[in-house]
Image: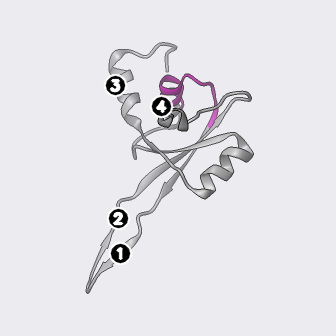
C-alpha cells in the first residue's frame, strides 16, 4: 500500500479491526511475545491489518499472522446451529511499542 492511504482506503481500514481479543491466552502471548490479538473482518488481508493497526493506534507493526477460527456448533433442544466463523490476527509490534487498552477506562 502507499505511504498515505486515501480517504476511501482509510474508511476500509477503520472497519477491518472489530475488537481486541481479551483472554488468558492473549494476555500471556502479549506479555511473552509483544503481540496483540485482534478480531478482524473475514476478508481482511495481512497488509491491510498492518496498515489499520498502524493508523488506529499510532504504533509500528513488525509482522502479522492470521488464523481462521471455526464457529462452534450449538444445540437448541433437538435443533443444531452454528456460530459464525471469524478471523483472528496476531499482530507483532516492533520493540518498544505498546498498545494499552486500559487507558480509556481511567475515568
- Which range is magenta? 50-63
Quarter where residue 59 is shown: top right
Q: Which residue is mark 3?
A: 11
Pointer 1 or 3: first along the chain: 3
Q: Using the image as rendered, state which of residue 106 and residue 36 is in the foreground.
A: 106
Residue 27, image x, y percentages: 63, 50
Q: Which residue is mark 4?
A: 48
The correct choice, above or below, for 48 with respect to 79 in the image is: above
Q: Is residue 101 visible?
A: no
Using the numbered discs, state the Cα–Cα distance from disc 3 to disc 2 in whole angstroms.
27 Å
The correct choice, above or below, for 7 with respect to 24 in the image is: above
Quarter where residue 7 is shown: top left
Residue 86, image x, y percentages: 42, 54
Mark number, residue 83: 2
Numbered disc 4: secondary structure: helix
73 displayed left or right of 107: left
Q: Are marks 1 and 3 in contact (CB under 8 Å)?
A: no
Using the numbered discs, state the Cα–Cα distance from disc 4 to disc 1 in whole angstroms.
32 Å
Q: Which residue is mark 1?
A: 74
In percent of the image, x 66 and y 45: which residue is there? Answer: 30
Using the numbered discs, state the Cα–Cα distance from disc 4 to disc 3 in whole angstroms.
12 Å
Numbered disc 2: secondary structure: loop
Q: Is residue 74 magenta?
A: no
Mark 3, other Cα within 10 Å: few <14 / some 14–19 / many ≥20: few
Q: Using the image as rendered, state which of residue 103 and residue 88 is in the foreground.
A: 103
Residue 84, image x, y percentages: 35, 60
Numbered disc 3: secondary structure: helix
Q: Are marks 1 and 2 in contact (CB under 8 Å)?
A: yes
Mark 2, other Cα within 10 Å: few <14 / some 14–19 / many ≥20: few
Number of on-image labels? 4
Amino acid at each position: 500500500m502507499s505511504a498515505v492511504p486515501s480517504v476511501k482506503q482509510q474508511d476500509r481500514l477503520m472497519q477491518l479491526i472489530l475488537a481486541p481479543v481479551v483472554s488468558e491466552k492473549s494476555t500471556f502471548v502479549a506479555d511473552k511475545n509483544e503481540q496483540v490479538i485482534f478480531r478482524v473482518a473475514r476478508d481482511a488481508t495481512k497488509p491491510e491489518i498492518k496498515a489499520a493497526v498502524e493508523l488506529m493506534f499510532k504504533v509500528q507493526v513488525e509482522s502479522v499472522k492470521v488464523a481462521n477460527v471455526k464457529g462452534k456448533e450449538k444445540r437448541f433442544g433437538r435443533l443444531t446451529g452454528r456460530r459464525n466463523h471469524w478471523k483472528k490476527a496476531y499482530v507483532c509490534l516492533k520493540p518498544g511499542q505498546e498498545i494499552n487498552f486500559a487507558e480509556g477506562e481511567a475515568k
